[in-house]
Amino acid sequence: MVGEGVLLECIRHQQVERILVVGRRPCGVVHQKVKEVLVPDFFDLSSIEPELRGFDACFFCLGVSSVGMKEPEYTKLTYDLTMNFARAVSKLNSNMTFCYISGAGTDTSEKGRSMWARVKGKTENDLMKLPFKQALAFRPGIMHPTPGMKNTLALYKYFAWIWYLGRPFSPSVFLRLSEVGTAMVNAALHGSEKKVLEAKDIYALSRK
């Protein structure tokens, strides 16, 4: 859901010249700016390495829920997979901004009780050690999908009322997915003073 929303904002933004979508299955979006490559195994990127060169930014929106997962499995699909992709693009693009969709409540101490928060925290910490121009962790909370999206979570329709209730009182917490995408583009274009962006920081950056 997040990936599609960010993609739509990249398409709309006049300063985004070209977009490479990397996924396991077709995203269903066709546009003159967009090229798509499919990779069955994100732990083996050798077949697509030539395609990954020449980009100013990577918006990494891939993720899984920790519900029902043991820590080793969640670590493989969250930390190992992300770091494998990030290491690959950092070697191929020396001036890249890497924007990672993390989550509200992530634990960068890596010592808390919450398993998912520790794993996300380690991922954030180690991404920022890679030789990027800038590596940023985005921690949105409740997000409202962009109208017309195809990949909205099925359960969202049961909880959408929370967003509509909270948005008028706290727009910097109850974000539009379009604001997350715009903030990521702005981070790539202008940089960010903060490396870890909570919802209120994402909201502010989307308005620059």
Image (cartoon, rainbow, N blue to C red):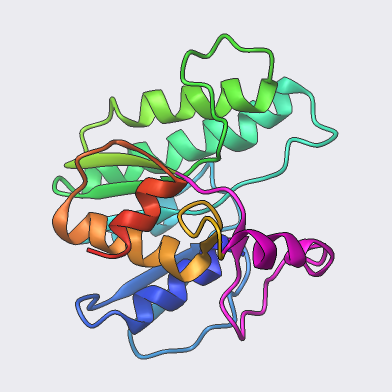
Q: In the figure, 100 relative to 111: above or below?
A: below
Residue at the image position 80 percent from the left and 70 percent from the top: 157
Corner quadrant of residue 40: bottom right
Q: Which of the pair 67/54 is nearer the observer?
A: 67
Q: Quadrant of the N terminus?
A: bottom right
Residue at the image position 39 percent from the left and 24 percent from the top: 125
Q: In the figure, 122 relative to 29: above or below?
A: above
Residue at the image position 55 percent from the left and 58 percent from the top: 169
Q: Which of the pair 60/164 is nearer the observer?
A: 164
- Regarding residue 38, the answer to whether it shows in the image is no
Corner quadrant of residue 143: bottom right
Residue at the image position 54 percent from the left and 47 percent from the top: 42
- Image x and y of residue 54, in percent: 19, 61
Report the label total.
Answer: 0
- Image x and y of residue 181, in percent: 41, 65
148 with respect to 29 (left or right): right
Task: Say whether residue 164 is magenta.
Answer: yes
27 with respect to 87 (left or right): right
Query: What stretch of residues is rendered in magenta?
Result: 139-167
Farthest residue, direction front:
169
- Image x and y of residue 28, in percent: 59, 82
Farthest residue, direction top:
111
142 with respect to 53 (left or right): right
Task: Say whether residue 208 is magenta.
Answer: no
108 with respect to 68 (left or right): left
- Regarding residue 147, the answer to whether it shows in the image is yes
Q: Which of the pair 63/177 is nearer the observer?
A: 177
Q: In the figure, 109 relative to 25: above or below?
A: above
Q: Quadrant of the C terminus?
A: bottom left
Q: Which of the pair 28/136 is nearer the observer?
A: 136
Q: In the figure, 71 relative to 191: above or below?
A: above
- Image x and y of residue 34, in percent: 38, 80
